[in-house]
Image (cartoon, rainbow, N blue to C red):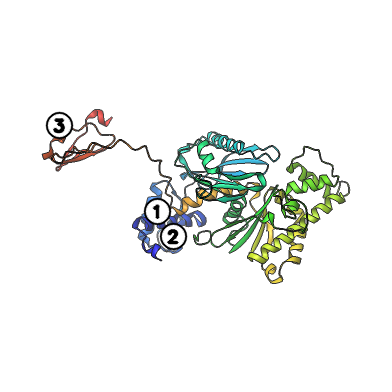
Amino acid sequence: MAERSRRTVRDLRRGNRARVLQRLYFDGPLSRQELGPATGLSSGSISNVVAELAAEGLLEEAGIVDSDGGRPRTLLRVAADGGLFVGIDIGETRVRVELFDLALTELARTDRLLAQHGYDVERIVSHVRTGVSDVLRDAGADPARLLGIGIGVPGIIERDGRGATGEPGAVVHGQTIGWSAVPFERMLRDAVDVPPEVPFFIDNGAKTLGQAEMWFGGGRGAGSAAVALIGSGVGASVNRGDILDEDLSDSALEWGHTTVQLRGRRCRCGSIGCLEAYAGAEAMRERWHEAGGPLPPDADDETALAALLAAAYPGPEGPPPDPVAVAILDETAACLGAALADLVNLFLPERILLGGWAGLLIGPHLLPEIRRYAQEYALRHAIARTTIAMGHLGPDAVTVGAATLPLSDFLARGGTRPAPAARPAAAPAPTAHPHRPAAPRRAEGCAAPPPSARHPARGLRGCVPGRGWQGGGHAVARPAYARA
């Protein structure tokens, strides 16, 4: 409460801008009259905020609708060309970089394929650097319009690495990919060619997937949801509350490293019996290969999973289903169902959504069995109020979610753009003589002061760009060469 009581006029103004922007972003287009009840602001405040945001190019008119007996109302919406975001998915098989406008419409994309399980940090940073450069070039976009870069990565994110490693910015601990306290944000800032004021936002990939589904996909409108990311590895996030409620936050879970089999398979994290050792695409590829499945020795996870599904579900005109492939997928469904039951019992979500590139491949085939196993393992009352379904956003959901990281910050700041980086400090001005008046100030863009400006009796205060030297009730016009 004490913190709220110290809010300044600037804080209140930014808060009002944030309310208007957020409502228009998620519920627009709306009229000024509709914005009042939606934000709790007075009509005068709405008019002022709308005028400011429109002048800054963040709002635009979206048509006119009739009112009940009064004048037609003008609808407003967030202007898609008001800024740019980059979303990046540091995935298991590729680095995907996408450029979005303010409405999160994709403008350009590029993929950088990774060698099988090749997580060399310097290579990943190089892929990000060239990827950002490529999407900006392909879209003909000015880097100065960037409002932020969001990155989804595997592992645990330490927000401020100074306490543990001495490095500023986000530090990534990715045990399964061999990253230990990697100062990822610092490395990206040093490598990526964007203006220095452009902020970077780094978070767990499962959390970015969850945020995308809550904002635009299958979680929209839910009070709480758990979103599973199933790729070569496995993760999840728990998402709670209204997307506009700053007091509620999402959480990334290392769900793939919960135990589903005592004395089970060795996981790539080093433990045994982890969910990821059964439900991850890498593990399914290894299990099929160990069981004698027909796989080329150099098959990657995507190729192997597609072949496993084709063998188990050949279609009506194909050969009989491969019993080994069927058994592997049934065990996968059982492990996923048991692990989802844990999420239900622990967090009581209204919805559970399956996503990730591998989840989108296996889900249409395994979802009925996954639901059945979850019902067997979960508490009856808890599972009765939970729906289990596929995510709605497809394979680009992590990239879209990564872009929502800077977008969320931009909306919360009321559309305030990143401040330009500070210039190097100039040399200190010479100290004025104690008995001698200081020379009038000279602003950038002003010509040298006229002789009269050097006379202390004139009382000139200094130069105002575009208006000339001011003071004493007189303005000294700028000469023609200075106005050019």
According to the picture, the residue beneath numbered tag 3 turns out to be 451
Give the farthest residue toward the bottom. 381
Q: CA distance from mark 3 to mark 2?
A: 55 Å
Left/right placement of residue 284 relative to residue 53 reads: right
**Can residue 310 be spotted in the picture?**
no
Q: Residues within 10 Å of mark 2 (few under 14, many from 20)?
A: many
284 or 371, which is in the foreground?
284
Q: Earlier in the sequence, mark 3 or mark 1?
A: 1
Image quadrant assignment for residue 35: bottom left
Q: Position of residue 318 (x, y in %)?
A: 86, 46
Q: Residues within 10 Å of mark 3 (few under 14, many from 20)?
A: few
Whole-Å distance between the Cαs marked 3 and 1? Answer: 46 Å
Q: Amino acid at mark 3?
A: Pro
Mark identifier at residue 197 = none
Amino acid type at mark 1: Val
Tell me which label, 3 or 2, sits earlier in the chain: 2
Q: Which residue position is annotated with label 1?
A: 50
Q: Please report the residue visible at 65 percent of the width from the left and 49 percent of the height from the top.
A: 394
Q: Which residue is mark 2?
A: 35
